Amino acid sequence: MTLRTIRRRRKEAKTDYKSRFALLKSEKPRLVIRKTNNYIIAQIVTSAIAQDKVIASFSSKDLLRIGWPKEKKGSLKSLPAGYLTGFMLGKKISEDVKEVILDMGMNRNIHGSRIYAVLKGFVDAGITIPHNEKALPSDERLKSSSKTSELIEKIKGANK
């Protein structure tokens, strides 16, 4: 019996090669969502031979430019911030890309999480993406407080 050497990026818990290969076989652009300690980053990525190219990107940090209150800077990784990040990226690329697939990377698949809040915002922007409606967070969770609800409506209304 021979032992296999585990690839470095798999050992570092950065890449799941099996799921990445399945995503690349589809030949569709990918909606790549990553969480950091402070922000949520969403990107549209296409793949050519062994290279990924970022077509468009939007970070929850960019919400500060378009109306997110400066005093709520610490909540840029919340569910509403994730929703608006996905919505703004969807509006940014709505003329260029019509259909994408979701790439969650090594994030856990938890229904109603921040990853799915980004997906819900992206779908609400008018982009087609295969998903299960049960996985998306409810509108009540997104608009949990009146301030958050007003903020979402203000930013969405300004960018329609």
Image (cartoon, rainbow, N blue to C red):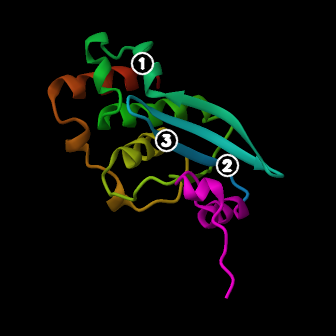
The disc at residue 29 is: 2
Tell me which residue sits at (50%, 43%) in the image.
33
Give the residue displayed 59% in from the left and 64% down from the top: 19
Q: CA distance from mark 1 to mark 2?
A: 27 Å
> Badge 3, how many Cα within 10 Å: few under 14, some, many 20+?
some
Q: Amino acid at mark 1?
A: Ala
Give the percent coordinates (x, y) of residue 139.
Answer: 25, 43
> Residue 34 got which mark?
3
Q: Secondary structure at mark 2?
A: loop
Drawn side of residue 84 relative to residue 69, left or right: right
Counting every numbered tag in the picture gives: 3
Residue 16 percent coordinates (x, y):
58, 60
Q: Which residues are magenta?
A: 1-26
Residue at the spot of label 1: 158
User: Nearer the observer, disc 1 or disc 2?
Assistant: 2
Q: Nearer the viewer, residue 83 or 10?
A: 10
Label 1 residue SS: helix
Give the farthest residue toward the left. Answer: 145
Q: Foreground mark, 3 or 1?
A: 3
Amino acid tagged 3: Arg
Which amino acid is tagged 2? Answer: Pro
Residue at 44%, 22% in the rendered image: 61
